[in-house]
Image (cartoon, grey):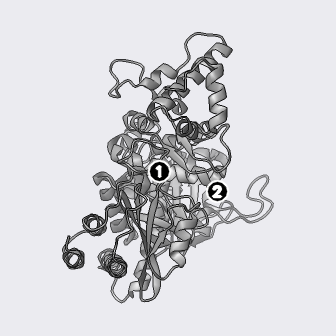
Amino acid sequence: MDLIKILVAISNDLTSALSARDRYQRLLDSLKRAVSYDAATLMQIDGDQLMPVATSGLSKDALGRRYPLNEHPRLAIICKSKEPICFPRDSSLPDPFDGLLTNNHDSSAQIHSCLGYPLYADAQLIGVLTMDALNPNAFDEIDPNFLNAVGAIAGAHMQTTRLIEALEVSANRQGNIVSDLMRDIQMHRGNEIIGNSPIMMHLKREITLVARSDFTVLVAGETGVGKELVARAIHAASDRHDKPVLYLNCAALPENLADSELFGHKQGAFTGAHRDRMGKFEVADGGTLFLDEIGELPLAIQAKLLRAIQEGEIQKVGSEKPIHVNVRLLAATNRDLETEVKAGRFRADLFHRLNVYPIRVPTLRERREDIHLLAGYFCEHTQRRLGIGPVRISPEAMDVLSAYNWPGNVRELENILSRSILKASSGITRGERVIILPVHLGNDLLPHDSDSTFPATSQSSMLPKAQSLREATQTFQKNLIQHALKINHGNLAAAGRALGMNRSNLHNLAKRLGINTRG
């Protein structure tokens, strides 16, 4: 193996016409030819956490996770170092990627070799490169000079890619320096629009394009797709990003208060108006106003809203004096407003004013390839909220998630994963790994008829038949334990970890249920 040739190949990629995503992935692929790793991750620093930009040998949901340094001591040690670190094989520190390797069927197997590189540019930490292996001796024979060269080149690789990203995003913004542009990129990521599918990449390009203008934007899409997230991303990427963005749900607005809520009122304008009040338009002056579910707005208010958009002028309830405001309006709806116009429930002139730049947010059914990323992100988020150990999704459970139709879209995915994690963590010692199985997802997600596109699995046998509660509980426990033993090849300790139990407790429970644990 010629290590010099590999270093040259990595260096050449710095000048290749590749996208940022391809550059990062090419770096990991090139290193694979020189280092026998089972998994590798390239992450960039994002405040006090690390965010993956490319992975190799890890499950797809790993790319959607975030890794806070205060929760992952190995990553924190790497970030504080000035040189590559190879952790001792007997290190007691948990590895952040345990249970996420794709080339190993034992989800409870521990990583034995861990190599980490802090990546610097101009003496500033910008990211981390990690390589993991199940073989305890995988990295013993690597030349230290080669390690140092890889770290230096990887740091330059990431910095170059970041600069190219910044220049691409800011091509039409003359006079801004690179540091300002990088802050803009970080701001966009802070809105957490998760997805790398073609349809989501198109949506992100639409957001970037329209954000530079001051156009009114109508965001359409089913309930739960993330319309508010898109609106906030547009504001964050606009020239108004340092001004307020106000949110108002028109569906929750009583008709008798809608006028006052939007435009404000003078003291004594109506019963209960004990003092002057600023409306949302006046408060949002210079910034952005997001009107969610605008199709629910009463017709009487729609005329005043049209005037505010056309003239930039509002009038408080009880006042004859107009107020000029400079507000960018973003609106969202899950209704077909053209149909509402034909039915006389929505003003045609207001619709055309709102529809200057329509954006449709795709359903989760249209971007199934993003389910892994979203699942990883929600697992990390729920893990921190509950204060539990690392959350992993079994391959069988991920198959169920991928096959489901998701009528409630991303919001439904988040809710189901939150419930599933809570169920899976029941009875598990705090800090131990939580593994989501199909049975934790709930019956609604499992196939019930022959038309389902999801193949039947052994998990279906875990669902209790018509029995007494005691019998159903015992049947469920027995099937679950037998399944855990099967996927862990009869290893009682590994099955216990998968079920969140220690070996002795699992052995005693299995014995009571009449399960042979001796193979």
- Above or below, 403 against 284 in this view is above
Dot 2 and dot 1 residues touching (CB under 8 Å)? no
Q: Judge by depth and name the residue closer to the eye, 445 or 391.
A: 391
Give the SS element for disc 2: helix
Give the SS element for disc 1: helix
Q: Judge by depth and name the residue closer to the eye, 36 or 292.
A: 36
Q: Is residue 51 left or right of residue 73?
A: left
Quadrant of the image for the N terminus?
A: bottom left
Q: Is residue 505 left or right of residue 2?
A: right
- Above or below, 486 against 261 in this view is above
> Which is more N-terminal, label 1 or label 2?
2
Packing grade of label 1 (10 A; few <14, some 14-19, many >=20) is: many
Q: Residue at x 47, y 51 (%)?
A: 376
Q: Judge by depth and name the residue closer to the eye, 173 or 133.
A: 133
- Circle nearer the viewer, 2 or 1: 1
The Cα atoms of the two marked residues, 2 and 1, are separated by 39 Å
Residue that mark 2 sits on? 261
Relative image position of residue 469 (x, y in whole percent): 67, 15
Q: Judge by depth and name the residue closer to the eye, 493 or 361.
A: 493
Residue 172, image quadrant: bottom left
Packing grade of label 2 (10 A; few <14, some 14-19, many >=20) is: many
Residue that mark 1 sits on? 376
Q: Is residue 453 left or right of residue 282?
A: left
* Residue 350 appears in view: no
Q: Residue at x 58, y 17 (%)?
A: 475
- Above or below, 173 against 254 in this view is below
Q: Residue at x 51, y 75 (%)?
A: 79
Relative image position of residue 130 (x, y in whole percent): 42, 67
Relative image position of residue 16 (x, y in whole percent): 19, 75
Relative image position of residue 255 (x, y in whole percent): 62, 45
- Above or below, 279 against 102 in this view is below
Query: What's under tag 1, amino acid-wise?
Result: Gly
